[in-house]
Every structure is written in structure tokens, then in C-alpha cells.
Image (tube, rainbow, N blue to C red):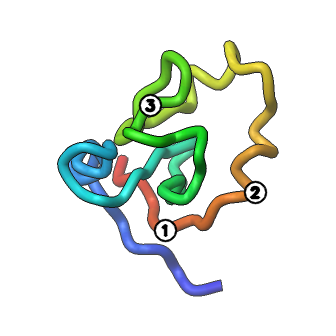
Amino acid sequence: MPELPQYTKSQLALRNGQDKPEIWVAYQGIIFDVTESRLWRKGQHYEHWAGQDLTPELADAPHTHEVFVRFKAVGQLKP
């Protein structure tokens, strides 16, 4: 598998469904493109906002990390 490009938190924040057409979220250092998900329209999914690292918020979600297998990994979050 080719190495994914790295993005900063600031670059991820621009993919919030408002500033750029892409809607991205990060989980455990991997950035996923959720643009095509009807659940992420306008960059919001329940109380969660796109363009950020959702790792700490997943514990409160009604689903597990397995939900991310549906989405394409597009990058790595720079530490």
C-alpha cells in the first residue's frame, strides 16, 4: 500500500464541508474522506463536526471504529 500524504490539523480543518468541497475526518492518525456520506452533509454528523480528529469522540458514538472501513483513507494526520 502506498504511503498516504500527510496533512496538518489546519489543513484537515479546511475540509469541514464549508471551506472546501471535501469533507474529511481523522481517526487514530488516518484521514478519511466522508464527502459522499449522506450522514456528513454540510460537514456535521449529529454533534460531530468534520475537519477534525474524532478519535476522542468515538467512545460516545453508537458504533465502533469499523464504520471507517466504508470510507477511503486519503491521508495521515501530522503529529
User: How many numbered marks have been drawn onto this rendered protein structure?
Assistant: 3
Q: Is residue 52 above or below residue 68?
A: above
Q: Position of residue 61 (x, y in %)?
A: 70, 20
Identify the residue at horizontal 45%, vertical 60% (top origin).
Answer: 76
Q: Residue at x 51, y 41 (%)?
A: 40
Front-lying residue, 74 or 19: 19
Tell me if residue 74 comes above or below residue 12 in the rendering: below
Is tag 3's residue or tag 2's residue first in the polypeptide sequence? 3
Nearest the camera: 68 or 2? 68
Q: Amino acid at mark 3?
A: Gln
Write down the residue under mark 1: 74
- Badge 1: residue crowd in 10 Å (few <14, some 14–19, many ≥20): some
Which residue is the site of mark 2? Answer: 69
Q: Amino acid at mark 1?
A: Val
Q: Amino acid at mark 2?
A: Val
Closer to viewer: mark 3 or mark 2: 3
Residue 9 lies, in percent from the top left, at 28, 44
Question: What label does residue 26 carry, if any?
Answer: none
From the viewer's perspective, tell me whether residue 17 is left or right of residue 56.
left
- Residue that carries the numbered disc 3 in the rendered image: 44
